[in-house]
Image (tube, rainbow, N blue to C red):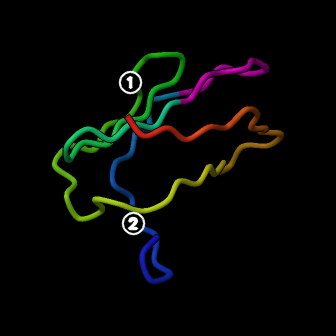
Amino acid sequence: MDNGVFTELAVNTSYVPPQNAWMTVRVEREGTTHRIKVNDQVVLAAPNEATYAWGSVALFSWAMSDVRFDDVTITTL
């Protein structure tokens, strides 16, 4: 979100998360590439995204009920 406007950097409409299971979600930034991994598999990548070189992290569940986040950590590598 930038100045109150959401911008989608990448979309994966084919990914279906497992139901009724805990998952490990990892958000990475390497150079200008953002990656989302679920259980160590890349499910989304936004390459060459230099516009948002810094910022904050947020977790959001869209159109899913009963989503829970636990043991959230942020690490600079």
Whether 66 is drawn above or below 37: the answer is below
Residue at the spot x=56%, y=27% of the render? 16
Whether 51 is drawn above or below 21: the answer is below
Q: CA separation, marks 2 and 1?
A: 20 Å
Q: Position of residue 21 (x, y in %)?
A: 75, 17
Residue at the spot x=46%, y=37% of the render? 27
Disc 2: CA contacts within 10 A as few (<14), some (14-19) or many (>=20)? few
Secondary structure type for disc 1: strand
Disc 1: CA contacts within 10 A as few (<14), some (14-19) or many (>=20)? few
Q: Position of residue 75 (x, y in %)?
A: 49, 38
Q: Quadrant of the C terminus?
A: top left
Q: Is 10 displayed left or right of 67 in the figure?
A: left
Q: Quadrant of residue 39?
A: top right
Closest to the observer, 20 or 32: 32
Q: Position of residue 68 (x, y in %)?
A: 79, 38
Q: Amino acid at mark 1?
A: Val
Q: Amino acid at mark 2?
A: Thr
Q: Label 1 belongs to which residue?
A: 42
Secondary structure type for disc 2: loop
- Single out the residue that lies furthest toward the right: 66
Rendered image: mark on residue 7? 2
* Start-end of magenta stretch: 16-25
Q: Position of residue 6 (x, y in %)?
A: 46, 70
Residue at the spot x=23%, y=65% of the render? 51
Rendered image: mark on residue 57? none
Which badge, 2 or 1, is on the more N-terminal residue?
2
Q: Quadrant of residue 65?
A: top right
Whether 59 is drawn above or below 1: the answer is above
The reply to whether the C-beta atoms of the residues labelled 2 and 1 are less than 8 Å apart is no
Closest to the observer, 18 or 59: 59
Q: Is 4 displayed left or right of 17 in the figure?
A: left
